[in-house]
């Protein structure tokens, strides 16, 4: 009995070393190690389109990316993430003051095609959500510096809807077998154009929020597009085959060989914040 309890305690301690989405280290536990996760400006949220303040900004929201600057794709243990060389990229206009450059983009999804997005619209969930993470290069000198300020980052949120195959996302799916396990990295062989993953003619919602993963810093201007893009069931299934822990050879036990199937944070209270709608 003692041995069994001891092994269970050691296993839990090992799991607690890193955050995740399980009962042991999931979103409800994050405030224990990351105080910002208990803040009043947390993301994601449920967006209720009724009675939102509609804005028409003086400058249209615009973005520009260099496909060849998509350098590598990694498996950090909770998603796939594409690292980008920011030079040449620019996100401007709309609610933004200054130029923001792309740092990386990644994805959240669920175990089935009807759930997986982090933000919801009047309670409606989507199959997944892409996040394009930018930092304010006009005011700050680096991503890490920008992440310390309320206007430091801007994240574009794009909903995924199960439907037809997405050719641009297929370039990412082709690399997933090379990063099946946590910590693995692969060079991007076929440049991915982030602009082709953004619904250009869609309106959007914007509000002040946070990173949706630890440390959950409250430094994000969120822009969540109304219209989703389509992705096939098979492509979503490929996302779910990513492993959330170490490689096959170094895994100490079967339970450490989990798959990434529900890597989304539940919605949090809006509080006194205001969500604004822009009909782009």
Image (spheres, rainbow, N blue to C red):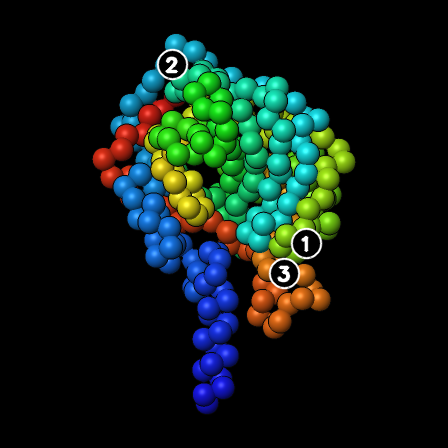
Q: Residue furthest right?
A: 189
Distance of mark 3 from mark 1, alpha carbons? 9 Å
What residue is drawn where x is 50% and y is 29%? 142
Q: Nearer the viewer, residue 97 or 200?
A: 97
> Can you give x and y, in whole percent of width and height, for residue 255 in the image?
57, 70
The number of discs equals 3
Report if the CB atoms under discs 3 and 2 are less than 8 Å apart.
no
Q: Where is mark 2, residue-wise? A: 57
| Residue highlighted by disc 3 | 246
Q: Position of residue 133 (x, y in %)?
A: 51, 33
Q: Point out the tag, 1 or 2, that comes first from the N-terminus.
A: 2
User: What number is the disc on residue 139?
Assistant: none
Residue 119 seen by the camera: no
Q: Is residue 50 shown above or below 6?
A: above
Going from the N terminus, do you reach mark 3 or mark 2 first?
Answer: 2
Instruction: Please report whichever mark, 3 or 1, sits nearer to the chain's N-terminal start.
Output: 1
| Residue drawn at x 47%, y 49% as measured from the top left | 264
Q: Residue at x 55, y 42 (%)?
A: 107
**Label 2 neighbour load within 10 Å: few <14, some 14-19, many 20+:** some
Label placed on residue 180: 1
Horizontal side of 148 relative to 235 (left or right) equals left
Q: Is residue 227 left or right of residue 46?
A: right
Any part of residue 186 in sight: yes
Q: Label 3 to label 2, Cα distance in Å? A: 47 Å
The local secondary structure at tag 3 comes to loop
CA gap, disc 1 and disc 2: 43 Å
Mark 1, residues whose alpha carbon is within 10 Å: few (<14), some, or many (≥20)? Answer: many
Question: Whole-percent x and y of residue 191?
Answer: 72, 30
Q: Are marks 1 and 2 in contact (CB under 8 Å)?
A: no
């Amino acid at each position: 009995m003692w041995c069994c309890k001891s092994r269970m305690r050691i296993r839990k301690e090992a799991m607690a070393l890193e955050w995740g989405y399980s009962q042991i280290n999931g979103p409800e536990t994050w405030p224990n190690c990351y105080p910002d996760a208990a803040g009043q400006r947390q993301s994601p949220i449920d967006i209720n389109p009724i009675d939102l303040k509609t804005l028409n900004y003086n400058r249209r929201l615009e973005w520009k990316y260099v496909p060849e600057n998509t350098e590598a794709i990694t498996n950090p243990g909770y998603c796939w993430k594409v690292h980008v060389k920011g030079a040449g990229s620019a996100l401007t206009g709309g609610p933004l003051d200054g130029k923001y450059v792309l740092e990386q983009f990644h994805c959240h999804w669920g175990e089935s095609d009807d759930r997986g997005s982090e933000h919801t619209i009047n309670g409606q969930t989507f199959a997944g959500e892409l996040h394009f993470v930018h930092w304010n290069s006009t005011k700050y000198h680096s991503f890490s510096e920008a992440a310390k300020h309320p206007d430091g980052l801007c994240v574009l949120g794009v909903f995924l809807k199960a439907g037809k195959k997405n050719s641009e996302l297929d370039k990412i799916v082709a690399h997933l077998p090379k990063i099946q396990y946590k910590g693995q990295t692969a060079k991007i062989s076929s440049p991915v154009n982030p602009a082709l993953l953004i619904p250009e003619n869609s309106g959007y919602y914007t509000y002040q929020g946070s990173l949706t993963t630890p440390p959950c810093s409250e430094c994000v201007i969120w822009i969540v597009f109304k219209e989703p893009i389509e992705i096939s069931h098979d492509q979503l299934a490929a996302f779910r085959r990513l492993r959330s822990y170490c490689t096959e050879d170094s895994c100490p036990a079967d339970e450490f060989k989990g798959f990434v199937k529900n890597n989304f944070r539940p919605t949090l209270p809006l509080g006194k914040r205001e969500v604004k709608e822009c009909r782009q």
